[in-house]
Image: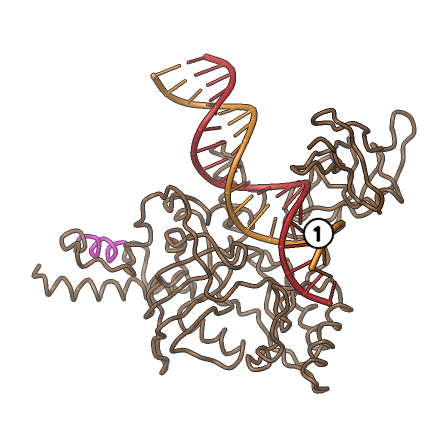
Chain colours: A brown, B red, C orange
Amino acid sequence: MERKEAEARAAWLRSELERHNYLYYVKDSPEITDAEYDALFRELQTIEAEYPDLVTPDSPTQRVGARPAEEFKHIRHRVPMLSLQNAMDEGELREFDARVCRLLETRDPIEYVCEPKFDGLSAELVYEDGVLLAASTRGDGFVGEDITANVKTIRSVPLRLRTGDGQAMPRLLEVRGEILMPIAAFDELNREREARGEPVFANPRNAAAGSARQLDPGVTAVRPLQFYAYALGVSEGFSVECQADLLRALRAFGFRVSDLFTVARGADEVMRAYRELGARRDSLPFEIDGMVVKVNSFALQRELGEVSRSPRWAIAFKFPPEQQVTRVEDIIVNVGRTGVLTPVACLRPVRVAGVMVKRATLHNEDEVARKGVMIGDHVLVQRAGDVIPEVVLVLKERRTGEERPFVMPSTCPACGGPVSRREGEVAWRCTSV
DNA sequence: TCTAAGCGTGTACAAAACAG
DNA sequence: CTGTTTTGTACACGCTTAGA
C-alpha cells in the first residue's frame, strides 16, 4: 500500500473504530459485530506495524500500548480536587439549603442538580486539543498519581473528544469523574477469580480502586472498569453556565454520563429526588452511596466559593448506613506509631454493605466508657463511610461467666513500658514510644 | 469555626523469609 | 534453586482530636 493511501486509510480506521467503540461502550448500542470490529482493528494494526510513524497517541491500538511501570509518577491538579461535606439526614440537607440561601441573600428556591454519588474512585482526565494526554487519581486533592496508561484501557473513556452540533474542539479540557466497576461485572470477575483460586475482591469500589492502580496496564485492561464524567477542572475554549449544561456537554463529548441526574428547585424537591434515587438504588447497575447536590448555576457557585477543602455550593447527601448485629469475640489493644493505644474489638465476621467486618475500633472512648463493651456482647455494626466500619452501639445481650469488662492495660502490649493518660487527654499513650 | 495531624481499614505490590 | 507465604510499605478514604 502506498504511504499516502495508508495514511488516509489509517485515519479513517481510527475514527471508525473510535465511533464503534463509543457506540458499544458508551451508548450500549453497537452497529457492527465483534468480529467486524476485530477485522477493522487488525487492519489498523497491520498498517501501523508497516508505518510506525503513523501511530498517534489517540489511536485505538494504543489503549493497551504502555509497558508496566516501575512506579506511579505524580500529577499536580491545576485546580484542587475538593472533597464534599456530608449531609446524613434531612435536617442537615435543609441546613445546607438554608446556608446557601442565606449566603446568596435570597428567599427564592435555589436550583440544584442532583446526581448519584458513585462509589468508586475519582479521577481527572486531561484533554489537549481533544486528545487524552494524562489521567490522575484524586490523591490528596492537590497531587494525584499518574494513571494515564491504565485509564486509556477503559473503553468508555474517549481517547479523542467527539465534537458536533456546533461545539468547537476545546484547547484544553480537564474532565473529572468516577472510575467504577459495575456490580454484574464485579460478580463475574470474582467468580472467575474464585475458580482460579485467586483471592476475591471485597466489593466493587475496592476492585475498581485496585484495578486502576495496577502498575501493569495489561492487568487493568482486562478489568471491567467504567468512567462516568461529572465535573470539570481547568478548561480553555469551552464554557457552559451551569452544571446541567455541563453534564449534557460531557455526554456530547463522548463520555458516559449518568442519566440519573435531575434538576430540583428548593429543599423539598431535593428531598423528593433523594427518595426517588434511594428507591432505585438497589436496581442500579453500579453502587452508589448517596446523592450529590450541587447549586446548578456556575455564577452562584463562584459567589458561594469554598471553605477549607470543600465547596460551599455542594453537599454529599448520604444514604442511611446499613447495620448488622454481631458478637464481640475479643478486645485487643493496638499501639500506634506515636504510642497511642487504641482498643480494637475483634468481631464475629459479619457482612455489612459489601465488606466483611472483623474488627472495629473502640477509640470513641466516651461511648465505650459510658456504656462499656464486654467480650460476649452483641454490638451493632454499621458501615460508616466507604470503608470504615464503626461500632456505634452496645449491649443487646450480656452473658454471664467468663466475660470480663475491658480495661486499658497498665503496660504497653508492644514494649511492656508504662502507659499513661495525662489530665484532660483523651488518648492513652505508651510513654516509652 | 476551620485546619492539620493522627489513626484504622483495606487494597496492591515488593522484598524477605520459608519450604519443597 | 524454585515457588509460596509472610512481612513491610504506600496509597485511598474518612473519621476524631487537637490546635489555631
Relative placement, left or right, of A378 versus A271 is: right
Question: Residue B16 in the image: x percent, y percent?
Answer: 48, 23
Q: Residue at x 42, y 73 (%)?
A: A235
Question: Residue A207 in the image: x percent, y percent?
Answer: 52, 46
Q: Please tell me whether mark 1 sits on a helix, a strand or a loop.
A: loop
Question: Residue A47 in the image: x percent, y percent?
Answer: 16, 56
Q: Please state the chain letter of the residue tagged with numbered disc 1 in the rendered image.
A: A
Q: Which residue is drawn at 42% across and 52% down?
A: A147
Is residue A404 or residue A291 the one in the foreground? A404
Residue A107 counted in the magenta span:
no
Q: Residues within 10 Å of mark 1 (few under 14, many from 20)?
A: some
Q: Which residue is drawn at 61% across and 69% down?
A: A311
Q: What stretch is highlighted in magenta?
A: A38-46
Image quadrant containing the C terminus of chain A: top right
Outermost residue, right side: A400
Asked if residue A194 is positioned above or below residue A77 in the image, the reply reads above
Q: Main secondary structure of the magenta part?
A: helix
Relative placement, left or right, of A152 versus A97 is: left
| Any part of residue A279 in sight | no
Q: Residue at x 61, y 63 (%)?
A: A309
Asked if residue A180 is positioned above or below residue A268 in the image, the reply reads above
Image quadrant containing the N terminus of chain A: bottom left
Question: Residue A222 in the image: x percent, y percent?
Answer: 40, 46
Q: Name the residue under label 1.
A: A384
Q: How many marks?
A: 1
Residue A42 counted in the magenta span:
yes
What's under tag 1, amino acid-wise? Answer: Ala
Asked if residue A166 is positioned above or below residue A222 in the image, the reply reads below
User: Residue A51 falls in which quadrant of the image?
Assistant: bottom left
| Any part of residue A131 in sight | yes
User: Residue A151 falls in which quadrant of the image?
Assistant: bottom left
